[in-house]
Image: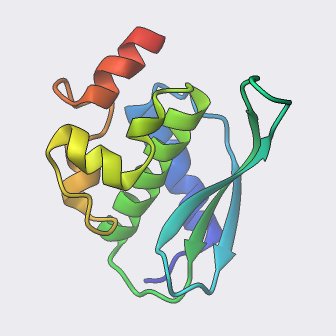
Amino acid sequence: MTANEEFVKDTFVRFNAELFRSELPMPRIRLSRASSFLGKLQYKVNRRGFGRKPVYSDYALIFSTLYDLSQSEWEDVVIHEMIHYMLMLHDLPRSFQRHSRWGKSTGMSPGIHTSAVTRTCVPSKCTSCPAQKSLQAAL
């Protein structure tokens, strides 16, 4: 199957309730014909001046329609992007928001958007990963 807007929205709502205690507001959902990614989080950065913290807004989850994956694999991609979204909304350490640093800090290899990463690091289920500890501290 290929990603479609209805599937992504339904999946977002379901996993938001199951994994994130319905704390994530619904972002814009967009589809793309990009071949360089399966899914990604996009946002705007408003830099407010030297030394001041930037403000992030206009979040969008974007999914490529070029790939034919199983429903389970697409669900993993949606969850993976939801984790990035949660990290941005809760202003968790930047080291957890990038794949390269995430892999180094957790000892896991993110690879591409695979179930091994998303199922290991789903914040509400993982008790040993650094993101869960930071999320608990933020809440």
**In front here: 25 or 128?**
128
Image quadrant of residue 52? Answer: top right
Quadrant showing the N terminus: bottom left
Image quadrant of residue 83? Answer: top left
Rendered position, 132 above or below 117: above
Q: Is residue 111 left or right of residue 82?
A: left
Instruction: From the top left corner, tell me how far across and down residue 35 is, in percent.
Output: 51, 87
**In front here: 86 or 79?**
86
Rendered position, 73 above or below 45: below
Q: Is residue 127 left or right of residue 15?
A: left
Q: Is residue 88 left or right of residue 15?
A: right
For image coordinates 47% across by 13% down, the residue present is: 138
Image quadrant of residue 64? Answer: bottom right
**In front here: 112 or 27?**
112
Instruction: From the top left corner, tell me how far across and down residue 31 is, in percent.
Output: 66, 74
For image coordinates 60% across by 56% down, the residue present is: 9
